[in-house]
Amino acid sequence: MLSYRHVYHAGNYADVLKHIVWQQVLLHLNRKDKPYCVVDTHSGAGMYQLAAAEAQKTAEYQDGVAKLFARGDMPDTVAEYVAAITELNGGDALSYYPGSPWLTAQALRDADRAWLCELHPQDFPLLLQTLRDAGTHPRRVKALKEDGFQTLIAKLPPAEKRGAVLIDPSYEIKADYQRVIEVVKQAYKRFATGTYVLWYPVVDRRRIKQMIAGLMDSNIRNIHQFELAIQSDSRQAQSGSGMTASGVFVINPPWTLAAQMQQTLPWLAESIAGIDGRWLCEELVPE
Ligand SMILES: C[S@@+](CC[C@H](N)C(=O)[O-])C[C@H]1O[C@@H](n2cnc3c(N)ncnc32)[C@H](O)[C@@H]1O
């Protein structure tokens, strides 16, 4: 039974970091003519109306993407992300926020392919609608009402031998913290040259340390960690609040990404969380 719906969280600070990284991964793949393929294991609805009652209930985007629009001195990565959102909205008003499927659909060229998995009975039809609205070819960009973990393994290695994978569970099932690492290890065995972006929330730091231990104990090379926090872990322990940071592990990132994130993360931390902002940019395993 899936209760999580991303519309309550669309455009929050976790989405900002994840989508900036995902956009850069896709832009990098587009620098070569050779076709590539994308798997998005947990796609969500693909597009969110910020005026919807669900998004307004939490208004998380106000402490995320909305804060970026107030600033002018953006690093290039943020400027590219804001430009995509501005284009979607037809101006500076923030009415719609794009999910990862929309960002993927915008980036893909005619010869590229994507599989987008979503299980939620309400969000799957919305995902189909997002793809129709984006004008994607249903045979090139396929929405599948399937378990993203299983489908990922089934689709690898891709015939194109180039590609990127986004793994973005909600972690409402706590076993997912371990499962994602097992799935990444299996996927890497099949497709070691792919780029993998694995999102995580920091609700309990011990779980993230276990994820890192699992990754470092594997044969996977070239692993980076990028994290954005709105509170320190110690403040989290005191207040018992929910998610206070989130990040991504990126395997085989574009070679330019670590340097870009060194510039991007301090700027995001300051713009979104002010003096409480924290960030992390680490190479966990070298190439
Ligand atoms: C965090 S949201 C995804 C957000 C999206 N990746 C984005 O960046 O816009 C996670 C989604 O995964 C879906 N989901 C949960 N378990 C799944 C599974 N095993 N396979 C596919 N989708 C799943 C949920 O219904 C939810 O919509």
Image (cartoon, rainbow, N blue to C red):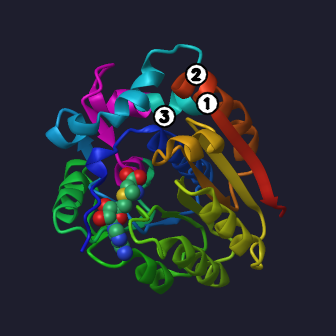
Mark toward the start of the polypeptide (3 vs 2): 3
Which amino acid lies under the numbered mark 2 shown in the image of this protein? Answer: Gly
For the residues bearing labels 1 and 2, Cβ distance under 8 angstroms: yes
Q: Is residue 221 left or right of residue 57?
A: right
Q: Which residue is mark 3?
A: 81
Can residue 75 be spotted in the picture? no
Classify 114 as above or below 259: below
Per the model, the C-alpha gap separating discs 1 and 2 is: 6 Å
Q: Which residue is mark 2?
A: 274
Question: Which residue appears at 22% of the width and 34% of the height?
Answer: 56
- Viewer-side residue, 55 vs 99: 55
Q: Is residue 13 left or right of residue 142?
A: right
Magenta stretch: includes residue 99: yes
Label 2 crowd bin: few (<14), some (14–19), many (20+), radius 10 Å: few
Classify 15 as above or below 205: above
Q: Which residues are magenta?
A: 83-106
Which marked residue is nearer to the observer: mark 1 or mark 3? 1
Q: Which residue is mark 1?
A: 277
Per the model, the C-alpha gap separating discs 3 and 2 is: 20 Å
Can residue 145 be spotted in the picture? yes
Where residue 11 sits: x, y (%)? 38, 38
Where residue 287 sits: x, y (%)? 83, 64
Which marked residue is nearer to the observer: mark 3 or mark 2? 2
Report the quarter where the N terminus lies: bottom left
